[in-house]
Image: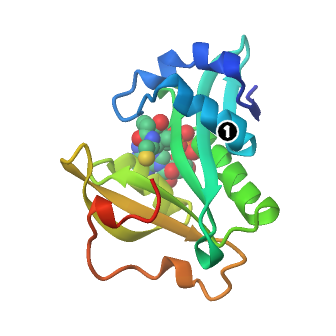
């Protein structure tokens, strides 16, 4: 049985096995603590029986006016628990909070242009490539900024793709 619950401080000491994955970024402790303190609704963990961490999602809500949106900072599932719809459930939870509680216009995320499995998953969940960010990852690999419109964006204006790639210094948010 899988339990999905809010992430808490102690989980930071238990999620190392999930973060071993080379596509999963590990941040410093203060980064995680800031997310826990400011956006607790956007930070959830999935646990297996015996309290093993299966995966987690962390994100935030940010922006102004029609750019007010939910953002997925990290979503990851341990290799042994993949293809069981776990990431989909975590993503749906974050989207629901952005849509119904925070009333955002869209949800967005960045993904490495080479991370085909994740891109396929996001597309399956209804995300589109909004724009390419040149050398977003460590000044080397391009990132794709993917978006999904929420119910508040009735005309789906937030997901009309940009015609040209941008550079990291043109990004509105960190
Ligand atoms: C990407 C990742 C989070 C997917 O987690 P998951 O729990 O296996 O995904 P789900 O089971 O919820 O997948 C939902 C759908 O997405 C698509 N999908 C997921 N993984 C896929 C893959 N490897 N190849 C193709 N499609 C995939 C499928 O359509 C899947 O539905 P299906 O299994 O019924 O066909 C996981 O592979 C992972 O943690 N990768 C490493 C970290 C990472 O890349 N995170 C994203 C960084 S932006």
In the image, taking residue 139 as reference, residue 102 lies left or right, namely right
Residue at 59% x, 65% y is 63
Residue 51 appears at what percent x and percent y? 71, 14
At 62% across and 35% down in the image, what residue appears? 34
> Which residue is depicted at the point 18% across and 47% down?
140
Q: Nearer the viewer, residue 78 or 174?
A: 174
Mark 1: few/some/many CA within 10 Å (<14, 14-19, 20+): many
What is the residue that sits farthest to the left in this orientation? Answer: 140
Give the answer, above or below, for where 156 lies relative to 44: below
Counting from the top left corner in percent of width and height, residue 168 is at 30, 59
Residue 83 in view (yes/no): no
In percent of width and height, residue 149 lies at 60, 73
Q: Nearer the viewer, residue 86 or 59?
A: 59
- Mark 1 and ligand 1: say if the CB distance to the nearest ligand atom is below 8 Å: no
Compared across the picture, whether 159 is left or right of 162 comes to right
Report the number of discs: 1
Res. 36 image quadrant: top right
Examine the image and state in which quarter residue 5 appears.
top right
The residue positioned 45% from the left and 63% from the top of the image is: 146
Residue at the bottom extreme of this rendering: 155
Q: Which residue is mark 1?
A: 43
Is residue 16 visible in the rendered image? The answer is yes
Quadrant occupied by the N terminus: top right
Eyeballing the image, is 90 above or below 67? above
Residue toward you, 147 or 62: 62
In terms of secondary structure, where does tag 1 sit?
A: strand
Q: Answer with the quarter of the image where residue 95 lies.
A: bottom right
* Residue 161: % across, % down: 40, 79
Q: How is the image coloured?
A: rainbow
**Vertical position of residue 70 compared to residue 72: above or below:** below
């Amino acid at each position: 049985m899988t339990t999905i619950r809010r992430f808490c401080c102690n989980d930071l000491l238990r999620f190392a096995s999930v973060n071993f994955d080379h596509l999963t970024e590990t941040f410093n402790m203060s980064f995680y603590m800031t997310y826990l303190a400011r956006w607790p609704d956007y930070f959830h963990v999935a646990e297996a029986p015996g309290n093993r961490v299966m995966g987690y999602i962390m994100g935030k809500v940010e922006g102004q006016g029609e750019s007010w949106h939910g953002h997925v900072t990290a979503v990851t599932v341990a290799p042994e628990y993949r293809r069981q719809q776990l990431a989909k459930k975590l993503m749906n939870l974050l989207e629901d909070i952005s849509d119904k509680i925070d009333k955002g216009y869209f949800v967005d995320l960045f993904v490495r242009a080479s991370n085909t499995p994740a891109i396929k998953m996001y597309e399956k969940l209804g995300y589109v490539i909004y724009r390419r960010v040149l050398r977003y990852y460590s000044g080397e690999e391009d990132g794709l900024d993917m978006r999904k419109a929420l119910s508040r964006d009735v005309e789906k204006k937030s997901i009309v793709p940009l015609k040209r790639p941008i550079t990291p210094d043109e990004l509105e948010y960190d």
